[in-house]
Image (tube, rainbow, N blue to C red):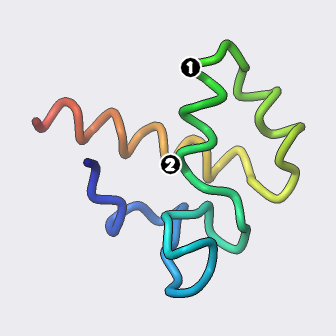
Amino acid sequence: MLDWSTCAGVERVAGKVSGTWLFRDTRVPVSALFENLENGATIEDFLRWFPGVTREQVDAVLAHAQRSLVDA
């Protein structure tokens, strides 16, 4: 499991969406990005479907995941 605590684009708030990691200032779980990408969606699709999420947040999440995989 990735440590999202150092990724600026996300937050975890007790009691908000069961304490899952969310895109900051939204109720959109980070996992939704990966699920949609795995199912063939593009980043542009995701941003259109979840208008509260910014491109900068998506880029930060993807960069964080990439760094975590490289460091593993």
Element under label 1?
A: helix
Would you identify the image quadrant in which residue 72 lies?
A: top left
Q: In the drawing, does residue 21 fall left or right of residue 49? A: left
Front residue (pair 50, 58): 50
State the residue lying farthest toward the front: 18
Q: Which mark is residue 14?
A: none
Q: Is residue 10 above or below residue 43?
A: below
Kindly identify which residue carries mark 1: 38
In the rendered structure, the answer to whether residue 4 lies left or right of residue 29 reads left
Name the residue type under label 2: Ala
Q: Position of residue 24 (x, y in %)?
A: 62, 69
Disc number for residue 60: 2
Q: Is residue 13 above or below residue 34?
A: below
Q: Alpha carbon of mark 1 to alpha carbon of mark 2: how far?
A: 18 Å
Q: Residue at x 49, y 64 (%)?
A: 21
Question: Which residue reaches farthest left?
Answer: 72
Marked residue nearer the N-terminal end (1 or 2)? 1
Nearer the camera: disc 1 or disc 2:
1
Q: Answer yes or no: do the residues labelled 1 and 2 have beta carbons within 8 Å? A: no
Residue 40, image x and y in percent?
67, 13
